[in-house]
Image: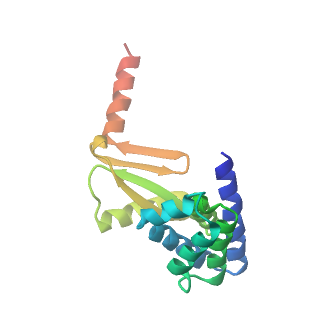
Amino acid sequence: MLNLQLARKYSTAIFEIAQEEDKLVEYGRELADVRSGLATVPAATAFLSNPQVETKAKKELIQKLFEGELSANVYNFLMLLVDKRRIALFEAIEDSYRELSNEARGILIADVTTAAPVDEAQTSSIKAKLEKITGKQVELRLHEDKDIIGGVVVKIGDRRIDGSVAGRLESLRKELLANN
């Protein structure tokens, strides 16, 4: 819980800087690039998260990996995280930043689960319907789950829309059991 609170504080700080500079998207992209870059080298993530490794060595690694690749503020933010021994929270910070940025730009994230892969036309149709329902811009995160048999399950925040065959079968089962 404490780590999530710390992550939220740091993400709010970089978010406010990005907002002042009108660079929400750019900073978000840079933070996501850092995250994906570190994810491709698990040894680097382990090195940066290790409390026994000296701060100087961590800073040297950050410098080798990202100097010249990032804006000055994002680069300095990473260095600050190393100085404050908070670099291990980077994924949570990036997640929190993305949430703050999406909220500020009026974007909703919809987790869409289908039994089979969806093509571009289906994706566009789902996105358009969700944007019409919510009145906001929607970004889709597509998932596959064969257990839903068919149809689609959409989750936006704490709202869940279950249009799956498995969901309908479960509703029918409950209704039949309730009538006995």
Q: Position of residue 144 (x, y in %)?
A: 32, 52
Q: What sort of colour scheme is used for the picture? A: rainbow
In the figure, 86 relative to 161: above or below?
Answer: below
State which quadrant residue 52 falls in: bottom right
Observer able to see residue 128: no
Name the residue: 45% across, 68% down: 36
In the figure, 8 relative to 58: above or below?
Answer: above
State which quadrant residue 23 falls in: bottom right
Q: Nearer the viewer, residue 34 or 155?
A: 34
Callout count: 0
Q: Position of residue 33 (x, y in %)?
A: 49, 73
Q: Nearer the viewer, residue 49 or 168?
A: 49
Name the residue: 53% across, 46% down: 159
Left or right: 86 as drawn, with respect to 138: right
Q: Position of residue 30 (x, y in %)?
A: 54, 76
Q: Could you tell me which quadrant the C terminus lies in?
A: top left
Left or right: 1 as drawn, with respect to 110: right
Name the residue: 72% across, 67% down: 13
Observer able to see residue 48: yes
User: Residue farthest to the top?
Assistant: 180
State which quadrant residue 90 falls in: bottom right
Q: Position of residue 108 (x, y in %)?
A: 54, 61
Q: Could you tell me which quadrant the N terminus lies in?
A: top right
Left or right: 169 as drawn, with respect to 13: left
